[in-house]
Image (cartoon, grey):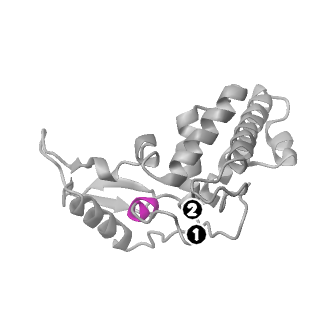
Amino acid sequence: MATGARSTKRPRCDGDDATWRDGVKWVSSEGGFISSSLAFDPAERRVTTLAPVPEGTVLMKIPAPCLLTVGKVAETDAGRALIEAAEAACSCRPPHNDRDDLVLALYMASLSADPPPDRHFGPYLATLPDPESYDTIPRRWSDGRLRSLLGGTSLLRRAERDREGLRGDYEAIRSKWEGSDGGDGSGSSAPPHFP
């Protein structure tokens, strides 16, 4: 689905605490707090406590600048263009997925560009799984694998509908995006890149 030369690799937690420490520093630098009683388990991709925690203890306070929301996306030129493209696409056909979910997913995909258009969320993105980890989701499977594993069940049609819906949403937004300037103000008919 992606166009242009882009890297999908992000820095990963490699068993040490570097990514977690970077994330804690980032949250703290924005006025938030993450308790030293918490640790990130890179193998399980979860946050755990290091010891019992008394009831009522504040473990984490994530400030607004660290929240990746549609409102944050709308603060960027490319984000506004993406929202406009999604709104235009959704006015032409009802989306299969929630419009805001689509905007956030596509914006996050654009942050994986090399270089990313916005480095602010890098510490957050580094904690996310590699894109290949989602290959266990049936809508990402080939037709052959879908039929082989889900043939004869109601799940086959559901997975096909999900995949078709997601592809349809993506193509509808992409076509509207390509008719815009991609938020770069150039007025060109082709935006710099689409996730």
Magenta part of the chain: 121-125
Residue 154 percent coordinates (x, y): 77, 25
| Residue type (three-letter) at the residue carrying disc 1 | Lys
| Quadrant of the image occupied by residue 20 | bottom left
Query: Closer to the camera: disc 1 or disc 2?
Result: 1
Q: Secondary structure at mark 2?
A: loop
Closest to the observer, 130 or 117: 117
Closest to the observer, 136 or 167: 167
Q: Which residue is mark 1?
A: 9
Residue 59 percent coordinates (x, y): 20, 49
| Quadrant of the image occupied by residue 98 | top right
Q: Which residue is mark 2?
A: 130
Q: Residues within 10 Å of mark 1 (few under 14, many from 20)?
A: some
Instruction: Verify CB contact (< 8 Å) between mark 1 and mark 2.
Output: yes
Q: Relative to 51, is 126 on the left or the right?
A: right
Residue 193 in the magenta stretch? The answer is no
Residue 47 percent coordinates (x, y): 34, 54
Question: Which residue is at the far front?
Answer: 187
Which residue corresponds to the image point at 66% horizontal and 30% vertical from the top-left?
Answer: 90
- Which quadrant, please, contains the N terminus? bottom right
3D distance between C-alphas at marks 1 and 2: 7 Å
| Residue type (three-letter) at the residue carrying disc 2 | Asp
Q: Secondary structure at mark 1?
A: loop
